Amino acid sequence: MPTYRGGRHEHGQNFLTDPSTIATMTRLVADTEGPIIEIGPGDGVLTSPLAQLGRPVTAVEIDTRLALRLAQRLPSHVEVIADDFLTYQLPPSAHVLVGNLPFHQTTAMLRRILHAPAWTDAIVLLQWEVARRRAGVGGATMMTAQWAPWFEFTLHSRVPARAFTPRPGVDGGILTIHRRERPLLPPAQRRQFHALVHRVYTGPGRGLAHILVRTTCLGSPDAAQAWLTRHGVNGAGLPKDMPVEAWVDLFKTTGSSPPSHRTRTRQLKSRRRRR
């Protein structure tokens, strides 16, 4: 199989080699509690310092060749499993996730992480721009907004491309995701909340005031503007500008269903009368 200086091309392996970044990720994990599951340990440069924390470590490595090599030189409290993290069954008990995620599978792995139960913290290394967007720098992505009632996203530091072997075409960034001890909405309402956020993010309109009128039951531009003003949000802004508290209140105020046909008819008649 083709390789790039030890990393298999089909697995998108860019091994982390920078001691400073390894120390930062280890420190972030050390600030958490519970067993550790490492995603894609590669040649183990992060696994070894994680093992020194004295906590149980499970390293999930898709490359069987690397998994066998790694298992031979790690202490007994580290379990190496040759498996694909995207299909690996995570434990139902509390644990911490950490890993240098393959850049070409970042979105799939993040979705796998966010849908998984039980873990308390995830410390992941992603593409820099992806890490910034997931942390809401410059505005939240739809994925971040959908999960914000249950998780907190924090951007920590930029990791230069030279910190990897082979060197990728972009820089990386360390992102931490913390499961809220007190979620802002019950888990049972997650699907409905996701539907609301999706509808608003993809809804038509110029600015939030118009978008909310067309995608929720707020009823009129004046009502939408008043609601946005109460939350300190500009009516000419975009969904990415809404803080999590506003999203939660929007869900509690309007629910997850789109405006009814009767409501939409009233809205259209009102706009026509104003012309």
Image: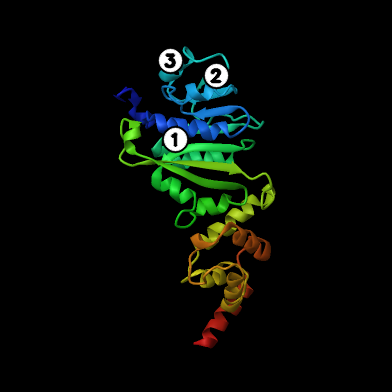
10 Å crowding of disc 2: few (<14), some (14-19), many (20+): many
Q: Mark 3 points at which residue?
A: 69
- For the point 58% across and 51% down, the residue is 148
Q: In which quarter of the image is the N terminus?
A: top left
Distance from Cα at disc 2 to Cα at disc 1? 20 Å
Nearer the viewer's eye, disc 2 or disc 3? 2
**Residue type, label 3:** Arg
Of all residues shown, which one is farthest toward the top? Answer: 72
Q: Is mark 2 on a helix, strand or loop?
A: strand
Q: In this view, does 261 lie above or below 145?
A: below
Estimate the x, y position of residue 131 in percent, counting from the top left.
45, 45
Q: Image quadrant of residue 12?
A: top left
Estimate the x, y position of residue 238 in percent, counting from the top left.
48, 65
Query: In the rendered structure, are the residues bearing label 3 and label 1 in contact, judged by CB atoms less than 8 Å apart?
Result: no
Q: Mark 1 points at which residue?
A: 101
Q: Image quadrant of residue 69?
A: top left
Distance from Cα at disc 2 to Cα at disc 3? 13 Å
**Residue type, label 2:** Val
Estimate the x, y position of residue 102 in percent, counting from the top left.
41, 35
Query: In the rendered structure, are the residues bearing label 2 and label 3 in contact, judged by CB atoms less than 8 Å apart?
Result: no
Q: What element carries label 1?
A: loop
Query: In the rendered structure, are the residues bearing label 2 and label 1 in contact, judged by CB atoms less than 8 Å apart?
Result: no
**Residue type, label 1:** Leu
Q: Mark 2 points at which residue?
A: 78
Estimate the x, y position of residue 183 in percent, counting from the top left.
67, 49
